[in-house]
Image: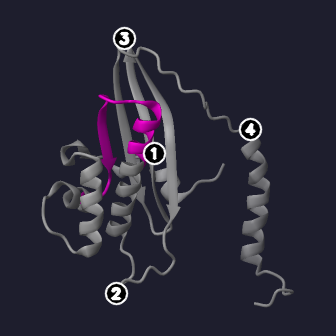
Amino acid sequence: MKWDEALPEEETSCFQQWMEEVTILQQIRIPRRITLFGRGSGSWSLHTFTDASKIAYGAVVFLRTEFNKSVFIQLLAAKARVAPVRAMEENGKSMTIPRLELMGCLVGARLCTTVKKSLDLTGVSEHYWTDSSTALAWIQRNKAWGCFVGNRTVEINKLTKGEDWKHVRGSMNPADLPSRGCTP
């Protein structure tokens, strides 16, 4: 396609729909204030959810606080990365979904570590959630994996404890939004 040619109808309608939806973004409000109430007297835990798809991978970190018989959940951080378009490895295979899921787990481990340091949340229990049973097995098994999987699981296990990683159903995973995208 040359620069001065008209876009195909399908792409034109897709772009027009995006233009209409982008105005809705002005109405979206996400609380940015972090309330660290109950410090010392309540129960705190960090919950990191990770996910991946063929288009992106990412993680979200929440602070769960139990205080005065109430539970409060606050979004602390989220990060997404676009999946490599043609991630070719030395053997010529393209990036698989399980490997992208593992990349999401690594993003989650790094993001949670950054959040803990930034907010001085030492001693807070940590829970990591993924809907990938393959990535979960790679992280929890202490084996010498191949280069790609091995390097990532070593870093994940330096930042987290294998027993803190758990499975969550895909339909219950809040990291599904940054990994698959959504409309306003």
Residue 145: name its quadrant. bottom left
Q: Report if residue 130 lies within the magenta region.
A: yes
Residue type indicated by callout 4? Gln
Height in image: 127 above or below 97? above
Tag 1 or tag 4, which sits nearer the N-term? 4
Q: Is residue 55 left or right of residue 125?
A: right
Residue interval drawn in magenta: 111-133
Q: Residue at x 50, y 46 (%)?
A: 78
Q: Is residue 33 left or right of residue 18?
A: left
Q: Residue at x 33, y 62 (%)?
A: 102
Q: Which mark is residue 60?
A: 1
* Mark 4 secondary-structure assignment: helix
Q: Residue at x 35, y 55 (%)?
A: 105
Residue contact between numbered discs 3 and 4, judged by CB atoms under 8 Å: no
Give the residue at mark 4: 27
Tag 3 or tag 1, which sits nearer the N-term? 1
* Mark 1 secondary-structure assignment: strand
Q: Quadrant of the N terminus?
A: bottom right
Q: Circle 3: is it few (<14), some (14-19), or many (20+) Cα within 10 Å?
A: few
Looking at the image, which residue sits at the far top? 68
Of circles 2 and 1, which is in front?
A: 2
Give the residue at mark 2: 90
Q: Which mark is residue 69?
A: 3
* Mark 2 secondary-structure assignment: loop
* Mark 3 secondary-structure assignment: loop
Of circles 3 and 2, which is in front?
A: 2
